[in-house]
Structures are given as structure tokens and as C-alpha cells.
Image (tube, rainbow, N blue to C red):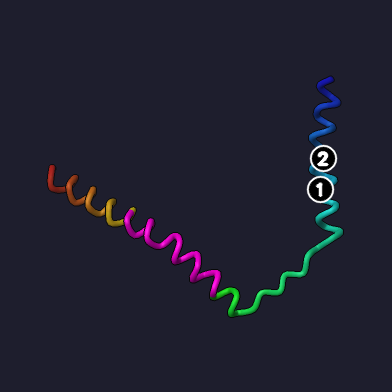
Amino acid sequence: MDDRLNTRFFYGPLALLINTLACRPVIAVGWQELLLLVLLIAFLIGPPLYRFFRGMENFRRRERKDK
């Protein structure tokens, strides 16, 4: 039983890998799309990162003040 389980978990990903290698999609992304993607990521991730770093700076400032 255990041997059958291991072979199933081996042949499943192997079949997906072979299928992926056989049917490679063509990725054609120009500079405009790449710029749009970078701007979208910056717009979505930028404000939370800014708040996080601002909070870390406030935390460090309070820790230094307490010592």
C-alpha cells in the first residue's frame, strides 16, 4: 500500500512536468505591459509596506527612548 502511494505521488508531478515542457506557452510581454505590471504591484504593495516601515521606525524610536 505504501509503495503504491509513493509511486502515485511520483508519477503525478512527472506527468504535469512532461505536459508543461511539451506545451511551452509563448510569453510576449512588451515594455508597456511590464511597466503597467510594476506600477500595479507598487500601487498595491507600496502603502502597506510604507505603513510597516513607518511602524518599525516608531517602534525602534520608542525602544531607544526607553533604554
Q: Position of residue 12 (x, y in %)?
A: 82, 40
Q: Nearer the viewer, residue 61 or 55?
A: 55
Position of 64 with respect to 43 (left or right) is left
- Name the quarter where the N terminus is drawn: top right
Q: Position of residue 52 (x, y in %)?
A: 33, 53
Q: Position of residue 58 (x, y in %)?
A: 22, 52
Q: Secondary structure at mark 2?
A: helix
Q: Position of residue 44 (x, y in %)?
A: 45, 61
When the figure is inspected, residue 26 is found, relative to residue 56, above or below; the finding is: below
Position of 53 with respect to 26 (left or right) is left
Q: Amino acid at mark 1?
A: Leu
Label ID, residue 12: 2
Position of 40 with respect to 10 (left or right) is left
Q: Residue at x 23, y 48 (%)?
A: 59
Residues tagged 1 and 2 counted as in contact (Cβ below 8 A): yes
Position of 61 with respect to 45 (left or right) is left
Q: Residue at x 66, y 74 (%)?
A: 29
Q: Amino acid at mark 2?
A: Gly
Specify whether residue 47 is painted magenta: yes
Q: Residue at x 13, y 47 (%)?
A: 65
Kindly identify which residue carries mark 1.
16
Specify whether residue 20 is painted magenta: no
Distance from Cα at disc 1 to Cα at disc 2: 6 Å
Q: Secondary structure at mark 1?
A: helix
The stretch of residues the image draws in magenta is 36-51
